[in-house]
């Protein structure tokens, strides 16, 4: 698990390779990642947008932007946690992701760019 804190918002990510949905012979590797967002600040915040960079070991970089996460724009009171699971496909058995969430403080509308720590997507046998 990797973790990063920005302006009192902690983002942690765990990854998992999905062999049942992957086809290495066809260069198709599926990974899921579980994100935990914890509001450690004194302000209520709302997650408005996401911005991801997805890289494979061939040097291909995909950029993904959009509203919320998995169809939601969660509001986190101080001390609240929001978790979700999402996934991505790669053409290689090793890759990485990083990004940001655009959050807004509810009290004054201040925008906060919260860092998502870079994490590795790797087929387990590559670790041997």
Image (spheres, helix red, strand yellow):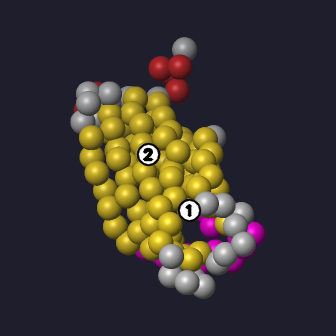
Q: Disc 1 marks which residue? A: 84
On whether residue 70 falls in the magenta region, the answer is: yes
- Image side of residue 68 versus residue 106, left or right: left
Q: Residue furthest top?
A: 128
Residue 60, quarter of picture:
top left
Q: Residue furthest right?
A: 79
Question: Residue 14 placed where, x, y %?
Answer: 59, 45
The residue under the point 47% across, 20% down is: 126
| Vertical order, 35 against 78 (above or below) | above
- Image side of residue 70 versus residue 59, left or right: right
Q: Nearer the viewer, residue 89 or 104?
A: 104
Q: Which span of residues is magenta-colored?
A: 68-83
- Secondary structure mostly seen in magenta is loop
Q: Please tell me how crowded label 2 is: few (under 14), some (14-19), or many (20+) other residues with Cα within 10 Å.
A: some
**Whether residue 69 is visible:** no
Question: Residue 128 placed where, x, y %?
Answer: 54, 14
Q: Disc 2 marks which residue? A: 98
Residue 75, quarter of picture:
bottom right
| Vertical order, 92 against 48 (above or below) | above
Quadrant where the N terminus lies? top right
The residue under the point 50% across, 82% down is: 109
Give the CA separation, mark 2 to mark 1.
16 Å
Is disc 2 placed on a helix, strand or loop?
Answer: strand
């Amino acid at each position: 698990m990797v973790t990063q804190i920005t302006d009192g918002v902690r983002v942690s990510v765990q990854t998992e390779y999905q062999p049942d949905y992957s086809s290495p012979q066809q260069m198709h590797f599926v990974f899921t990642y579980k994100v935990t967002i914890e509001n450690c600040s004194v302000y209520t915040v709302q997650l408005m947008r996401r911005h991801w960079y997805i890289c494979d070991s061939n040097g291909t970089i995909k950029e993904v932007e959009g509203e919320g996460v998995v169809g939601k724009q969660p509001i986190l009171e101080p001390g609240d946690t929001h978790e979700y699971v999402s996934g991505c496909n790669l053409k290689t058995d090793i890759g990485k992701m990083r990004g940001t969430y655009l959050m807004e403080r509810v009290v004054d509308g201040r925008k906060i760019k919260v860092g998502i720590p870079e994490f590795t997507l790797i087929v387990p046998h590559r670790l041997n």
